[in-house]
Image: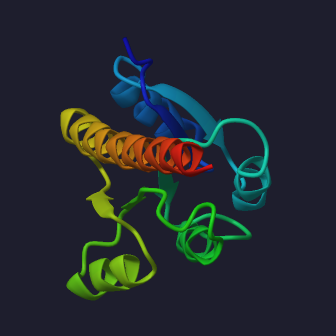
Amino acid sequence: MQSAPLVWVLDDSPGETEAILRALTSACRVVTFTDGAALLEALGVGPMPDVLVLDWYLPGMTGLEVCRFVRQASATALLPVLLLTVNTRASDVVEAMSAGAHDYVFKPFRPMELQARVTALASHERKRRQQLEDERARRLLAEGTLT
């Protein structure tokens, strides 16, 4: 049986972080960050998360900036990102998606909706990773039969 998806949450508000944890912990393993630079540094160490949940507005590096940075690195370019924000204008959604977000949830969020969107992104990411592993295994097998 597969373990629960690993979700990294970036939000500087303790209250919002607690609400996100309540929404996700029954279905996901959640690691929280309050600083975009710390999250980006952690991406290079240990297991890769299945999904990033990023608050848009943060002191220092914003969630949108973190998303853009994640998209630039080949190791994380396809990592699912969900932006969580109070921005509800259509132009904000377009900006988030243009920055590389896969999904967008408005605050205040409905816990069931947030969990459903995050687990759907995680499921898709795990299938993508499994397909890559399967392809690598087929390639290695094919190379082994040729030598």
Residue in the picture at 49% in, 51% down = 139
Where the N terminus falls, by quadrant?
A: top left
Residue 37, picture quadrant: bottom right
Q: Judge by depth and name the residue closer to the eye, 144 or 5.
A: 144
- Residue 109 horizontal/vertical position (percent): 27, 46
Relative horizontal placement of residue 104, taking residue 12 as reference (left or right):
left
Residue 114 falls in image quadrant = top left
What colour scheme governs how the chains and residues are painted in the rendered image of this protein? rainbow
Farthest bottom residue in view: 91
Classify 63 as above or below 16.
Answer: below
Task: Establish if 111 lies above or below 92.
Answer: above
Task: Give the tally of numbered discs.
Answer: 0
> Seen in the image, is 64 located left or right of residue 5?
right
Q: Relative to the observer, which residue lies in front, 136 or 55?
A: 136
Nearest the eye: 57 or 124 = 124
In percent of the image, x 44 and y 18: which residue is there? Answer: 3
Image spot of residue 144 (x, y percent): 58, 43
> Residue at 25% of width from left, 42% of height from top?
120
Residue at 45 percent of width and 80 percent of height:
99
Q: Where is residue 27 in the image (x, y as percent from the top left)?
A: 34, 22
Q: Can you say whether 90 is above or below 127 in the image?
A: below
Q: Observer-nearest residue: 93 or 134?
A: 134
In the picture as drawn, the residue positioned furthest to the top comes out as 1
Q: Which residue lies furthest to the front in this view?
A: 147
Q: Residue 71: image x %, image y %?
A: 55, 73
